Image (cartoon, helix red, strand yellow):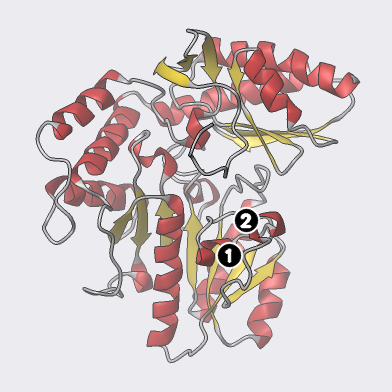
Amino acid sequence: MSHVMNTYARLPVTFTHGQGCRIFDEEGREYLDALAGIAVSTLGHAHPKLAAAIAEQAGRLLHTSNIYRIGKQERLADKLCQLAGMDEVFFANSGCEANEAAIKLARFYGHKQGIELPTIIVMEKAFHGRTLATLSATGNRKTQAGFEPLVSGFVRVPYGDLEAIRAIAGHNKNVVAVMLEILQGEGGIHLVDPVYYQGVRQLCDSKGWLMICDEVQCGMGRTGKWFGYQQVGVQPDVMTLAKGLGGGVPIGACLAGGKAAGLFGPGNHGSTFGGNPLASAAALTTIEVIEADDLLANAARIGGLIRQLFAEALAGGKGVREIRGQGLMIGIELDRPCGELVGKALAAGLLINVTADTVIRLLPPLIFGDSEARELVSRLTPLIREFLAA
């Protein structure tokens, strides 16, 4: 019996190594990885350039703390700001830490304006993390249950409902920010009309609010652009990253620009490990490979191919509500809970996930190619058809 705390319903498999889009278990069995460690393994497994960069950095210097300047961290901040159109970056270790920084930044911004109870508008079905503040911002009662009292200072609205935000703006003078995912991941791979995001941006500008985009899952090229907000024609004031940023090495980032930049000073926020030399080296290399191998275009093309192939393969069958997504962030919504498909896929040598009970979530590495796309569809389609026929 393991002494690891029982916080996950783990599948009965242990992986030992991987190569590209393939991963292998203790018995040497091979699996096609269409989950990428939940959108983390951007370059797949054992990418030679990433492995070499990590090894080289580990042989020189792992950690110094943020008491001192870190050269690679500064280079990474410069690169991220260039790609994102932002001004500064705070580095953390995870998505929830990046979102905690964004929440603190919004509250700090509010207090600077004399607002005693700064309030952030958040979305139904959102997922921002499992710390108390990010859990409170999350729009899922199942994950919140048992952890009350939750942190105050959040007002929830339906995702995609601009009028609901306007209604709050009309009577709540404590609002300082709107926080949303451009493409909801845990909530079921939801994307709405770009007009909505542009409306949120305009409303934030008119009210002096911050627009916070949580790009933890959809950022770093997964949608076919560096960040999801670049798909819908808006520029946030605050943006958070993690998951795919380090290609598998833990790192998170909170970027600020415009009126959100320059707010924090020494002592306002911190992290012992955030952006240390190892994590920064991994993130820089991940970005370099994405650029050199044109993986943004690949994500857009292969993602479109996967959705097209599934639409063709599942056409005419009952039980499939919608196939949706952007780039290599894909959801297949069924008309019933389908969690059992995760185990069935594992038995068939395929790694997938189910979220929001009824949505098959596919998050392949950005290096997925045509052959892997077709293999994914050919392996998963019979499982879906068999499940729906039962």
Say which amino acid is labelled 1: Ala
- SS label for mark 2: loop
Q: Between 9 and 232, which is closer to the camera in this rendering?
A: 9
**What residue is rendered at 67% in x and 69% in y?**
156
Locate residue 338 relative to residue 98 in the image: left or right.
Answer: right
Indicate which disc, 2 or 1, sits on the residue closer to the N terminus.
Answer: 2
Which residue is the site of mark 1?
137
Q: Amino acid at mark 2?
A: Ala
Foreground of the two, 77 or 108: 108
Confirm whether residue 205 shows in the render. Answer: yes
Asked if the residue at tag 1 contacts the one at tag 2, i.e. Cβ–Cβ closer than 8 Å, the answer is: yes
Q: Which mark is residue 28?
A: none
Q: Quadrant of the C terminus?
A: top right
Residue pointed to by mark 2: 126
Instruction: Report how far apart the C-alphas of labels 2 and 1 lie in the structure.
Output: 8 Å
Mark 1 Cα-neighbour bin, 10 Å: few <14, some 14–19, many ≥20: many
> Residue at position x 47%, y 16% from top?
23
Q: As drawn, is 184 to the left or to the right of 204?
A: right
Locate residue 263, reporting x and y percent. 31, 75
Q: Quadrant of residue 151?
A: bottom right
When asked about the image quadrant of residue 262, the answer is: bottom left
